[in-house]
Amino acid sequence: MSKNTELTEYIMDQLSDLGDIRNISMMGGYIFYYKERIFGGIYGSGFMVKITEASKKYMPDSIPEPPYKGAKPMLPVTILEEREKLQAMVEEMYPELPERRPKKKVQGR
């Protein structure tokens, strides 16, 4: 089992009380969704979340950095072991996250 797979399972367990959390494997990492809105992911440097008022409030010590070259900066998660705090942060981030774009319909179908 890879380090990323173990970390993914740990994060899913830490957030399991929220319900409606899922992840998909993408480009060697994982993208995490809460109620179908992307809030973070696992990248080469570890678990990171989008920069929102809630994520800044819960992790004032986290320094923004791009998860990969050319990406928008995100916040490395510094509260992973703090289950309740992590869940509260993700819940509070939800209204600040962009809605998922609807898939484009293919013409002529």
Image: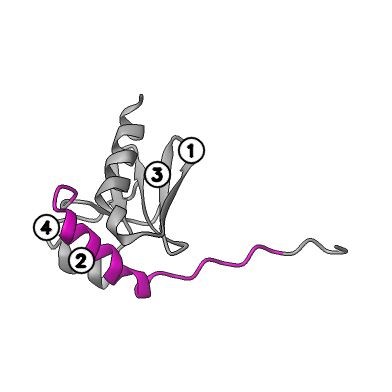
Identify the residue at image location x=48%, y=38%. Answer: 27
Look at mark 2 in the image and give the residue it sits on: 56
| Residue type at tag 4 | Asp
> Can residue 28 be seen in this snapshot?
yes
| Residue type at tag 1 | Met
**Number of other residues with Cα within 10 Å of mark 4, as a class: few under 14, some 14 to 19, many 20 or more:** few
Look at mark 4 in the image and give the residue it sits on: 61
- State the image coordinates of residue 54 (x, y, percent, origin top left): 24, 70
Q: Do callouts 3 and 1 mark residues in contact (Cβ within 8 Å)?
A: no
What is the residue that sits farthest to the top in this orientation? 1
- State the image coordinates of residue 72 (x, y, percent, origin top left): 38, 56
Q: Do callouts 3 and 4 mark residues in contact (Cβ within 8 Å)?
A: no
Identify the residue at image location x=33%, y=37%. Answer: 44
| Residue type at tag 3 | Lys
**Number of other residues with Cα within 10 Å of mark 1, as a class: few under 14, some 14 to 19, many 20 or more:** few
As measured in the structure, the alpha-carbon distance from the residue carrying label 1 to the one carrying label 4 is 28 Å
